[in-house]
Each structure stands twice: as C-alpha cells, then as structure tokens.
Image (tube, rainbow, N blue to C red):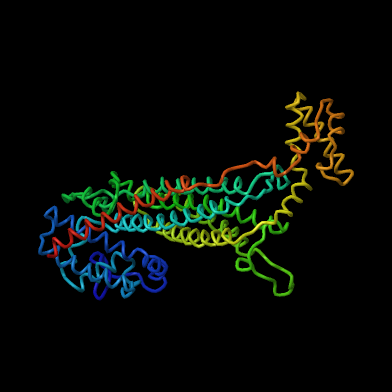
Amino acid sequence: MANSKMLWGGRFSATPKGAIRSFLSSENISLDTRFLPYDIEGSMAHVCMLCKQGILKKQEAAPILRALLQLQARAGKNELALDAELEDVHMNVEAEATKLTPEAKKMHTARSRNDQVSLDTRLYLRHEMNKTSRQLVLLVKELAFLSKRKTIFPSYTHMQIAQPITLSFYCRAYADAFARDFSRISECYCRINLNPLGAGAVAGTTWNIDREHTASLLGFSGVQQSPLDVVTSRGEMEAELIFALTMLLTHAGRVAEDICLLSSKRIAILSDSTSTGSSMMPQKKNPDPMELLRGKTARMHGLLMHSLSLMKGLPSGYNMDSQESKYAVMHALDTAQECIPVLCEVLATIDFDADAIKEELEKGYACATELADLLARKGVPFRSAHEITGKLVKGRIAKKKYLSALAASEVSQLAGVKITEPELQAALNVDKTSRMHSPISSDFIAPLQKAIAEREERILAAKKLLEKEVKQITG
C-alpha cells in the first residue's frame, strides 16, 4: 500500500478515504487529544519494561525513550497536533516517535491498540476522578459552612409542608448524599486502577513481559488478569463511572430544584451574581443557573443510557462500537465538573428569609405532628391523637387561623386530657420543634480528603519511579 500513513497497511492495497475516513477518525481524534499525555506515559512504561525483560536492548530502548520525552515536552506546550489520517492517538505517537528515531518501530512489540486504549482510558479517568472528587469535597465544605447558620427550615413531603427542621439538618442530608457519591467514585476507581497492558489484541502475548512491573511504573494497584476480559469489558468501567456521576448530578439537581422552589416562595434569596433577569419583565430575578443545572441532569441520564445500550449484545473480543464509550464518559465528566462549581457558588452566596420561613411553616400547620405526639405522651392512643389533631387543623383552616392561635383549654376538651398552656406553646413553637442537627464537622470531611491524598500520592510515587527508570536507560 504505497504512500499511506497507516501503520497497519501491509495487508491492504487501498485505505478508507473521504466520508469513511472522516467517519472513522474525525470525532475520535479530537477526543484522543485528552489521551495524549497518558499515551506517551504508558509507552514509556512499556518500553522500560521491554528493556528490563531483555526484549529490547538498552541501545534500542534509549533512543525511543528520548523521542518520547521530546513528544512529552511538545505535548505539554500544546505543540503536538494529532493527524486524523493516522486514526488515533496511539498511531500518532508512534509515527512522531519514528520520525525522531527508527528504533520507535519496535515500541509496539507485545502490545496492541486494544490494551493500549484501555490503558490510556484508565490513566485519564484516574486523573479526572480525582479532580471530580476534589470538587465534591469543596461542595461538602460549602454545605458544612452553610450548616453553621442557626436557621429554621421547612421540610416537605409530596411538595407540601411537612415538619420544621433546621438548615443544618437539611445540609447534613445532602452532605451524606454527596459522600455516597464520593464513595461510589472511589469504589469505581479501585476497579479502574488495574493494569490492562499485556492483554494484547485479545489473547495476550507469548513475549516474556512483566505486567506487574508496568503496573508499578504507572501506579496501578494490580493487574487485570484475563486478556479477553480486558478487551471485551471496554465500556464497562466507563458506564460504571457515568452511573456514579449520574447519581451525583441527580443529587445536585435535587438541591437545585429545592432552591428554585424556595426562591419562588421568597424563602431562598439568590445573590444577584447567581441570578439573571428578563428581557421584558423588569422585576424578574430568575434562578437560571439552578434551572440549567437541573437540565444538565437529564443530559447525564442520557449519557448513562448511551453507555449501557452500547454494550448490549456485543460479542466477546474487541468491537469498534466501544469507541463510543469514550464520548460518553468524557462528556459525563465535563458535565459533572461544570455543574459542581456552579452549585458551590450558589450555596456560598445564598441567603434565607427567617420571617418567610416561619410564615411558610405556620401556613402549612407544620407543628401538627408535634401536637399529636404531645397528646400521645399524655396517654391518648396515637391514632386517636392523630385524628384529634386533624380535626383541630381542619378547624383552624376553616377559621383561617394558625395552630399557634389554639388555646390549651380547647385542646384539652377535645382530647380528654389535661394540656397546660406552656406545654401547648412548646409543641407549637417552630423554633423549639425544629429537628435539630449539629453543624457538619471537619471529622466528616477529613476521610474524603485523606482518600484523595492517598490516591494522588501513589500516582506521584509511580511517576518518580518511571522517571528514575527512564534516566537509568537513557543515561
């Protein structure tokens, strides 16, 4: 196949052109730019391992590593553009290295693009998962800061007023939810952090490679054992991560929805810097960032369905369909990493109207449950106490009055038990009946920070080990 840039051309007399070439490579090559530093790093580790095993002589490995170091420097300065005619990042790196030394033609020994793309994906995802995890910690910190405010807060069921709570009680609920999201990402990280190199195209390799050594140079916690599983499971780790990100955005979208609803009641007051106006109605102050965040959650759900549907019905081994998983996971990460800082900024600048909150709780007869509990503590069976309280609420609604206007004598007469005025007022005081919760402490956040630090320290140690080995070979 004359005059072709393809590195697999020996068997072919013609190559894809025009629409076919563009279809195969145009979108993929733009996404592969993100893989470039990881592809170079993975190739360095692979060449070091080949040299250690005697598959490459030191005088063969050294010029390859020097070429890769040059490419690494160019990539760091955004001076290494990828050529779509070479299909992907792997062939681009090999072609560029070969321009610098003919020895680079040997760097693909005992390796396939099938295990190579799995490697690049894992290295890229590790970095992005740590970035997302750091953002999550900042989000929990904003909730912790907000939880220090001594503010009563409304809770809802079926979008109707339920019971009085506190702002700290609300913040702790979402701190717990985001901590679960952090945990899901961490668990996914453990499954991703395995070395796929050595799987080859599908059946491994007969070369005497050392997969554990490559794993140590790249900071992996172990080796993915089955070559067939390495290749067949492409898309699985992406789908698992997208699920974790979907849950994260679902939780964030729920907070956004709460803020939209509370701002419409003038309970939540968004800062001007996190709101927008209307081109026609001068009085409007719209929670557009929160509405858009809520909408981004739908995009994330779509990406999850994309990734799951992609794997359905695929046979064992490598299939080009799985290339689509790259699009899904990259866009999922982009979406999550765009949304989390927005929610952080809104939470950092939001305010709440205490008078509006009390009015909302009074209008919703939010202390009715506490009144029923008071009667039950006095010996009235709870079901009877529930019915009596319901009648009292019905009477207040008919008179267009709140429960706080009740007299102890009226309650005592209907319930058949003695209720004192102080007891009744304590039950109907939204400040006293609010479900209290202490502010979120640093002890809640510290384990999250420690987990990220441990992961990043392992990666940094591996980078230093790889640099040391490269220097030993290149002199």
Residue at the image position 73 percent from the left and 46 percent from the top: 160
Q: Quadrant of the C terminus?
A: bottom left
Q: Residue furthest right?
A: 399
Quarter holding residue 88: bottom left
Which residue is more in the foreground, 366 or 95?
A: 366
Residue at the image position 34 percent from the left and 73 percent from the top: 78
Which residue is more in the foreground, 409 or 273?
A: 409
Q: Is residue 387 left or right of residue 169?
A: right
Q: Is residue 152 left or right of residue 327?
A: right
Give how far across and how far down residue 322 sits, in percent. Answer: 40, 56
Give how far across and how far down residue 192 sits, in percent. Answer: 36, 49
Vertical relation: 381 (above or below) 113: above
Give how far across and how far down residue 308 sits, in percent. Answer: 48, 50
Residue at the image position 22 percent from the left and 49 percent from the top: 211
Q: Quadrant of the N terminus?
A: bottom left
Which residue is more in the foreground, 110 or 120?
A: 120
Vertical relation: 457 (above or below) 368: below
Give how far across and how far down residue 355 sits, in percent. Answer: 74, 54
Vertical relation: 442 (above or below) 274: above
Quarter holding residue 71: bottom left
Which residue is more in the foreground, 361 or 105?
A: 361
Q: How many marks?
A: 0
Q: Residue furthest front?
A: 422
